[in-house]
Image (cartoon, rainbow, N blue to C red):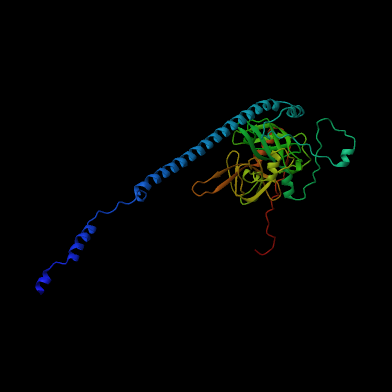
Amino acid sequence: MTDGENTTPDSTSGAASPAGDAERQSPPVAAPWYRSPWFWALPLFICLLLLATWLVWKEWQAAESRRAALERQTTEARQSNQAREAFLQRLRPLLEKQPCDVQRELDAISPPDGLTWPISPVTPARPPAAAEAPSTQKPHSPQRAAVAPPSSVAELLEQATVLILAQRKEGLSMGSGFFVTSGHIVTNAHVVGDASQAIVVNKATGGPLAATVLRATQSGGRDFAVLEVREAPPVTPLTLAAGVKRTERVSAWGFPGAVTADDLQFTAMLQGSAAAPEVVYTDGAVSVILQRTPPLIVHTATVSQGNSGGPLVNDKGDVVGINTFIKLDDESYRQSSLAIVSASLADYLRSEGISFSQASPAPQAPATQPAKGGKP
């Protein structure tokens, strides 16, 4: 019957159905161990930890190396300072002796490495003709350099303005000065301080020369010192002006540290050469004359540390004042340059028995009288 045939179960289909269900219900197969993320995470973490440890160790090694180098430099600097201090202790007694004796003892003293002070005075070289002639000079008397007479105000100031180096208790001091006679130099007392000897130099001296501090005073508004140079070349000394007026054009000459420190000739001189740095010129005008005791000239010529003791001159080259200090306005950032009038310096030189040249006062113009019978 058809119905029986239709209801008779198919042996083939009935056998295949249970097998397919079994395959669909079988559990998943586990992944291999090397595919597990936790397996690789642990070695990676260990590698990162080792790298961090190595970097920290390298940084610690570098820090230890820097610390050791710093300690070594500090020890070397301390030893160098001790050697220099011992060297200066041996030099200080020489300040009381004669220049010839000082030079002999300096030759027997070996300065520490890197120390070039004090600078030994340099004897200017003689021309060949003079060297062939029989010497008639006394022992230890250096030859004077030939200095041509100045042909301009600039040449006059270049010859007469000198750099001054003085070894004070607190250290080396640098300033300016100028010749007022053929053997005397004027500067500020605060430049030389407590030193009894100094070194003076410019291009006209032919090299550094020894100078003796004769007088120094810092009282009553005065700040003056007189130095004596026994073997100075025949430079033309400066003349002190009879007076100074407001708005008068002036110029300052000297050796400001801000400029001189960059001069290669100055560096060579500190290393024992006979070189001399360039004198620095600035110009301006007299702003006001403060009526103090002594009077002070306020001017606009730029000066800085190292100009102290240098001359302030008019257009004729006559000294109207000695540059002494500067003042700074914190609010406007303006600088005022101040110089002590030359009249006070002249009084000081007279009281110390130092001769000098002073310009004659300018003649007063006669008052004009109306011509008789003339029309008004």
Instruction: Tell me if I can see residue 240 in this picture.
Output: no
Observer-nearest of 44 and 169: 44
Instruction: Residue 279: give x, y in percent of width and height.
Output: 69, 46
Position above or below: 264 against 89: below
Query: Where residue 17 sits: x, y (%)?
Result: 19, 62
Residue at 9%, 73% in the rendered image: 3
The quadrant of the picture occupied by the C terminus is bottom right
Picture coordinates of residue 5 (x, y %)?
12, 71
Question: For this view, does 280 lie left or right of residue 133?
Answer: left
Q: Residue at x 88, y 41 (%)?
A: 129
Query: 91 or 77, which is in the foreground?
Result: 77
Quadrant position of residue 258: top right
Q: Quadrant of residue 14?
A: bottom left
The total number of labels drawn is 0
Look at the image and tell me in which quarter the N terminus lies.
bottom left
> Can residue 328 be seen?
yes
Q: Is residue 30 left or right of residue 132?
A: left
Q: Nearer the viewer, residue 157 or 97?
A: 97
Q: Would residue 207 be found to the left or right of residue 243 on screen?
A: right
Q: Work out whether residue 225 or residue 94 is closer to the camera in this orientation and state it.
A: 94
Q: Is residue 333 left or right of residue 359?
A: left
Q: Where does the image place residue 138, in percent across and percent down from the top left?
A: 84, 30
